[in-house]
Amino acid sequence: MAGVSDLVLKFSCGDQPGIVAAVAGLFALQGFNIRESSQYEDVSTGRFFMRTVLESVEGPKQLADIKAAFAPVAERYDMQWDLHDRHYKPRMLVAVSQWGHCLNNLLNSWKRGMLPVDLVGVFSNHEDMRPLTQWYDVPFHYLPVTAETKAEQQEKILQLLQSSGSDFLVLARYMQILSDELCRQLAGRAINIHHSFLPGFKGARPYHQAFDRGVKLIGATAHYVTAELDEGPIIEQAVERVSHADTPEELVEIGRDTEAVVLNRAVRWHAQHRVLLNGNKTVVFNR
C-alpha cells in the first residue's frame, strides 16, 4: 500500500497546558515537520481547536501507523480528531433542483482544478440540469419525488451516496427537505446554501418579499445540514449592498451570484479540512 508524505490534522479538546507541545513532539518523533498550523481557544467554552499541515522528512509513511501512534495523545486530551492524507480529494455528490447557478459554479471550479474534490455525480428531482451536468462529463441521476414517494426517494439518495463512495453531499439549491434520519447519517458531511434573509422572508419568492420591504443588504449563508431546517452550523456568509433602484429580478441575480460564491468557499474549506464543529457553530481556519 502506498504511503503518505503530507497530512492534515484537525482536532478540538478542552483547553489545558501542553497540548501543542504534545502534538508537535509526537509528530517530530514520527519524522514529520510542521508546515502550517492554526490554533484557536473559545474562551466562552474553554475549548481548544487546532489544524496542522505536516510533511514527512523521512519519505512516505502508512496513514494507519501514524493514526495509531497519535491515538494515545488524542486519548490523553480527550480529543475529537481527524487525520487525513493532504492530497486525497474527498468524493463529493451534488444535489440540485431547477436553479443551476450554484451547480454551474461548482462544476466550473472543479473542471479548472480549483476545487480539491473528486466529483462523483449529480442528482436531481428534475431533469433540467442534466444537459449542464453531462456537458462536464459528470454522471447525472434523476430521482423524482412526490409526497407519496418521499421515503422511497430518500432511500435512493442514501443508496447513491453509498454506491458512489461519497464522502460528503452538497445541496446546490436542492429544494427538497432531507429526512431527519438522513440528516443524522450525514452530520458534518452535508452542506446547504440559502439566502441570508432567514428567518425573515420565508417561503416562495423571498427576493420579491425583500423588494417589498426595501432591504438594503442581501446575502447568502452556507451551513451544515441538520434536522432543524436551515439552522445548522454556519460555515460561510457574504452580503451585497443593494438600493431602491434594483428591481426584484436584479435582486434575484445578485443573490444568486452571492449564493454561488459562498457555497464554493464552504465546499473548498470543507474539502481542505479547514472547518471544525464547535457545538452549533464552526471554527474555520481559512487563512
Image (cartoon, rainbow, N blue to C red):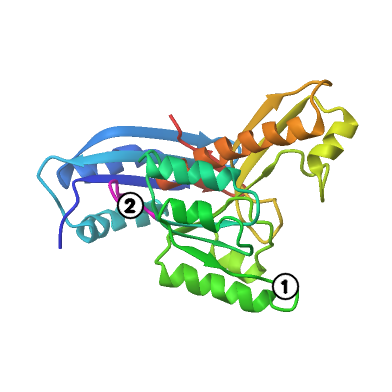
Q: Earlier in the sequence, mark 2 or mark 1?
A: 2
Q: Is residue 89 magenta?
A: yes
Residue type, mark 2 in image: Leu
Whole-percent x, y for residue 1 in the image: 15, 63
Whole-percent x, y for residue 183 in the image: 60, 64
Whole-percent x, y for residue 173 in the image: 63, 51
Q: Can residue 189 be seen in the rendering of this structure?
A: no
> Could you classify mark 1 by the number of other residues whose Cα lies within 10 Å: few (under 14), some (14-19), or many (20 or more)?
few
Q: Is residue 20 magenta?
A: no
Residue type, mark 1 in image: Thr
Mark 2 to mark 1: distance in Å?
Answer: 41 Å
Q: Can residue 148 be seen in the rendering of this structure?
A: yes
Q: Nearer the viewer, residue 135 or 65?
A: 135
Tell me the SS state at disc 2: strand
Residue bearing mark 2: 83
Whole-percent x, y for residue 24 in the image: 26, 39
Residue drawn at 12 percent across, 40 percent down:
57
Residue bearing mark 1: 146
Q: Please identify the quadrant where the C terminus is shown.
A: top left
Q: Which residues are magenta?
A: 83-90
Residue 136, disc: none
